Image: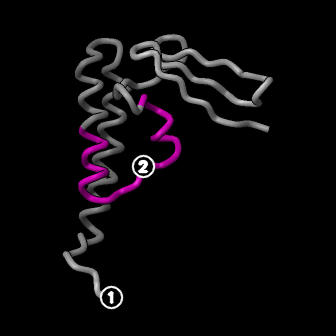
């Protein structure tokens, strides 16, 4: 079947990726001075990704909390430990208390 709707040109997706990268870098710089602005930058980066159907890289996804959009900095906005029983790395956001588990070998 033929797809309905128009596809976005490649140059638009390229610009969207650049904007996402810029916004996430700004969010990292702003987190200590103005956390609310930092969360807004992450929110904008995620909406640009959704609007232009651009996937975030794995490292970009690990930079922020998916629940509250806070940039995760070890010791400042997140706490990390290893759960040897389940063989998982556990990350806890200190802003919203959300837990993320990532398996390891």
The quarter in which the C terminus is drawn is: top right
Q: Earlier in the sequence, mark 1 or mark 2?
A: 1
> Which residue corresponds to the image point at 28% horizontal and 47% vertical from the top-left?
19
Image quadrant where residue 51 sits: bottom left
Q: Nearer the viewer, mark 1 or mark 2?
A: 1
> Which residue corresponds to the image point at 33% horizontal and 88% vertical from the top-left?
1
Percent of width and height locating residue 25: 36, 34
Q: Label 2: how many residues lie within 10 Å, few (<14), some (14-19) or many (20+)?
A: some
> Which residue corresponds to the image point at 57% horizontal and 23% vertical from the top-left?
91
Is mark 1 in CB contact (under 8 Å) with mark 2?
Answer: no
> Which residue corresponds to the image point at 24% horizontal and 73% vertical from the top-left?
7
How far, Cα to Cα, is label 1 from label 2?
Answer: 29 Å
Q: Which residue is mark 1?
A: 1
Q: Is residue 60 magenta?
A: yes
Q: Does residue 90 appear left or right of residue 19 in this picture?
A: right
Q: Is residue 64 magenta?
A: yes
Identify the magenta region.
44-65
Percent of width and height locating residue 42: 31, 33
Percent of width and height locating residue 39: 29, 25
- Identify the secondary structure beneath mark 1: loop
Nearest the viewer among 43 and 30 is 43
Residue 91 higher or lower than 8, as above or below: above
Residue 4 higher or lower than 95, as above or below: below
Q: Label 1: how many residues lie within 10 Å, few (<14), some (14-19) or many (20+)?
A: few
- Identify the secondary structure beneath mark 2: loop
Q: Which residue is mark 2?
A: 56
């Amino acid at each position: 079947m033929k797809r309905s709707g128009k596809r976005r040109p490649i140059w638009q997706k390229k610009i969207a990726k650049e904007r996402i990268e810029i916004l996430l870098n700004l969010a990292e710089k702003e987190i200590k001075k103005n956390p609310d602005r930092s969360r807004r930058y992450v929110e904008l980066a995620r909406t640009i990704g959704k609007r232009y159907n651009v996937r975030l890289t794995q490292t970009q996804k690990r930079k922020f909390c998916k629940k509250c959009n806070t940039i995760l900095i070890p010791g400042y906005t997140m706490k990390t430990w290893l759960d040897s029983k389940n063989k998982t790395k556990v990350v806890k956001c200190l802003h919203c208390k959300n837990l993320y588990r990532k398996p390891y070998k």
